[in-house]
Amino acid sequence: MGVVSGQDAGVEELLPLPAATFHILMALAEDDRHGYGMIQDVAARTDGALKLSAGTLYRSIQRMLEQGLIVETRERPAPEEDDERRRYYRITTFGAAVARAEARRLTQLVRLARASGFAPGKA
Amino acid sequence: MMALYRALLRLYPASFRAEYGEEMCSIFAGRRRDATGLFPTLGLWLAALEDIAVNAVRVHGDILRQDLAFIARTLRRSRGFALTAVAVAALGIGATTAAFSITDHVLFRPLPFAKPDRLVRLWQNQGGYGHTELSPANYRDWKRMSRSFEEMGAFGGQAYNLAGDGEPERVEGRWLTGEVFRILGVRPALGRVFGPEADAPDAPATIVLGYGLWQARFGGEASVLGRQVLVDGAPHVVIGVMPASFHFPNRDVQLWIAKTFVDADFADRTDTYVYGVARLNRDISLEQARAEMRLVAAQLERAFPNENARTSATVDRLRDELSPEARLLPLALLGAAACVLLIACTNLTHLLLARAMVRRKELAVRAALGAGRERLMRQLLTESLVLALVGGALGVLIAASAAPVLARLVPHSLPIAEAPPMDLRVLAFALVLTAGTGIAFGVLPASRAGHAGVSGLQEGARGGVGGRRERARSTLVVAEVTASVVLLVCCGLLLRALWRVQSVDPGFSANGVLTLRTALPQPRYASTATRAQFYARVLSEVRALPGVSDAAYVSGLPMVMRGGIWGLVVPGEAQEPGAQPPASARFVTPGFFATLGIPLRSGRDFRDSDTREAPFVAVVSESLAERHWPGQDPIGRRFRFGGADRTVVGVVGDIRVRGLERTSEPQVYLAHQQVADSSIIGYTPKDLAFRASGPPLDLLPSVRSIIHRADPQQPISDVRLLSDIVEGETAPRRIQVRVLAAFAAVAFFLAAIGLHGVLSFAVTSRAPEIGVRIALGARSADILSMVLREALQMAAVGLGLGLLLAYIAGRGMEALLAGVRPADAATFLAATGLSALMTLAGSLLPAVRAVHVNPVDVMRLE
């Protein structure tokens, strides 16, 4: 669309990430995936606790594309795995940086929670 | 099943659907295959419904946010455009909202009473005389004999002297029977209202205060309840205070007095002074009530063939107590506002079209970058809605600030507040109007841009103007010219009507005359001699003030008291029974004619010796003398008037008793001392008038102390210059003209801008053609006439249509025109001249620019 260029926006401006966005970034950490693949990956990763709905998924994808967190990739996977009707997405460097920053933020948060005795583990 | 899912996906924006719809369908299809059995399938559908409902709203929100951010950026870049568009929208929406608020207030909004659609007024209808008040006896019998009403009540009276607790003052008030407050169903703000106990003959006299009077005179203190005050000299107890929103029967009334009819009131069935009000039974229609009342009146006519001769009954809704003029004005205003709005919308369309042309390349680039046509249109439409919303907010402010002026257009006869309220109802109207405006002026440019977006890059960069497109623009200009001509003509017609009314000679000379009222209360001043003493003392002292040339008392000032019409009998004249020629009767002190500057044509003025012991005399107006004694000397003629035989001793000029715009009955003046003791208050002079050589208001403090010395308990009210009273006659007209002139000026201005916009756009886009013509040897005059011809063509079509529509509009508002013909030639000529001027003004700059097109520059750009 080119209406909003997310690349200009700093990493910090996007934090905290919506849960769905963070999960999608994690799903794309290793492999390019299509939408349905992301839903399956997220479900598997969370032992079925989080099932992204189609609407939430594609709304997130649209926003992440605009923010520059992911791109649609033209490279297709190996023919036997390829589903021609589907679009594949890949995490960008910026997307990876944002995901790392979010992970850092959450880690710090958990550390603070431990200090106040809300979470198990060493302070 | 998939068809249903696809249908639901339509809730998403088209751009989103185009991008992801297929994949969403395939995900849903996959999940449906997995879900077997009734409950899993049901669960799947529920989840899908929730998903779509929630996310469709969010995706729309995302796009809206993006569009708004983008629009904010682009509008910041083109501030001039944004300001112009907002100002034009504000004018259009403001004018229409203001007009709506007053039309709604006067004509449509339910009255502020319980179940107001069932409230009715009752009138006697005497053959030939139209609506009149009821006599107490007829009221009592109507109430007893009718079945159509839940309850029927009566009210009447005028103004009362309020004393005790501070300065005595004259307060507009009404007496009411106990039923009236119940019929209206409004609860008091404080205390209670009159109940059935008020109808008991030995009940203590009670009053209810209006909110304004309570605040002004009693400081808004709750302790006012139970306090005793003097109303026309008699003690009354305050039992309640009505809320500020309560007005009955009109907004000037601030005091209600409990009234109980006694047997003596029912004695004279022809003495009509009671107003009837009632609440219809739940299942009775207005027509049924009317039919029943006609029957009741017919029965009473048979029972009292003399008193009730040709007397029928009329039932009207309380809401409909409006003259045709009062009904017409708000509608005319709404029409004018619609014209302004139409012009504003067409102007905005021009603005956006021109801007879309300028942005053609940008839009084309964005389309090429993948923004779909729908997405571009949506953004442009959002832009026009944003402009309309900002303009609408400003417009509401304009409408709110116009409220004090508009309030003066609200007729007095309705029980409603003066100022139209600016509440949710009006705001909702403004919002709908704003959205409508935004869409109306945004759709055409947006759809154009949508097409342009696709083809913009293929065409030549400057882009020519297609014939069809130009025709659409010309149509817009024609519409603008038409609307502004209609407004100009209507405004001109009203202005002519105002001039005509203003030039009417009232028959007296108002300048330098101050009037004030000292209504002497009964029974203190029941005897004529006591009143005469008061008048004599006050008048002699006022006449002695420096600069005062004349002073007099009269029972009713012209244009203030319009009634007081009696029938007269001239001996020897053939007359139908019950159809005596009417004349307005006024009791005056000597010196009245000199004070008001009414010329004495022959005979003499009254003298102090014209008492009850002397022969009864009268001074009549010229028209009366001419009618009854044509070609003869009226002095010494006798006629019967007001229950006594009178001799004409003087003839004076006629005056406009009923006002500048109505024909008045001939006048009969009677001597103030030739009145029986204890006669009703309307017979006694109450208005003091004096003529001074300097500013008469400077003498007011001296006059006040003169009256205070004569009677310390006597309130003074209605201090007014006679010239203000005469000017008050044309005040509504002046406001009408001012408001319509404001609308016409806005329309005129906007139409000129519109013409200018279209022509300069045409010149810009035809610059190459003009350049070629110049290069081929066309002279400046040829180019000038080419542009002007185009302007004149549009203006001529608009003018023709406008004059035609204006004539139709003028016919519609003939009631407001005071006899000026709707086809008034001068007005139509003036409007034609003005629109010619507007055409020239609008086309001047573009024409000059066309002449200065440099063929070399144009060619190079091509």
Image (cartoon, rainbow, N blue to C red):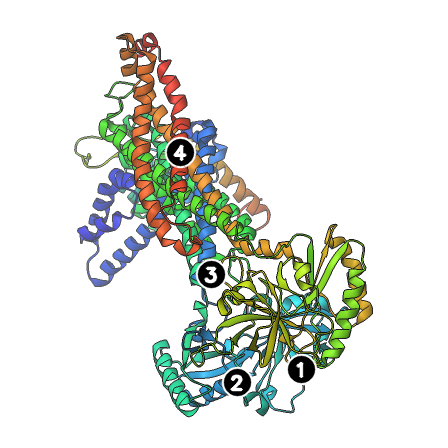
Comes first in the chain, label 4 or label 2: 2
Q: Secondary structure at mark 2?
A: helix
Question: Is there any visible trace of residue A89 in the rendered image?
Answer: no
Q: Which residue is mark 3?
A: B106
Which amino acid type is shown beneath numbered disc 1? Ala
Q: Residue B28 location in percent, x, y?
A: 23, 49
Q: Which residue is mark 4?
A: B833
Q: Nearer the viewer, mark 3 or mark 1?
A: 1
Q: Chain of mark 1?
A: B
Other residues around mark 4 within 10 Å, as few (<14) / some (14–19) / many (≥20): few
Q: CA distance from mark 2 to mark 1?
A: 24 Å
Q: Residue at x 77, y 72 (%)?
A: B534
- As displayed, is residue B10 above or below residue B558? above
Q: Which residue is mark 1?
A: B676
Q: Are marks 2 and 3 in contact (CB under 8 Å)?
A: no
Which amino acid type is shown beneath numbered disc 2? Pro
Q: Are marks 2 and 1 in contact (CB under 8 Å)?
A: no
Q: CA distance from mark 4 to mark 2?
A: 60 Å
Q: Is residue B457 left or right of residue B693?
A: left
Q: Chain of mark 2?
A: B
**Residue at far right of view:** B709
Same chain assignment for discs 4 and 1: yes
Q: CA distance from mark 3 to mark 4?
A: 36 Å
Which amino acid type is shown beneath numbered disc 3? Val
Comes first in the chain, label 2 or label 3: 3
Q: Residue B34 location in percent, x, y?
A: 21, 53
Checking the image for residue B136, the label placed there is 2
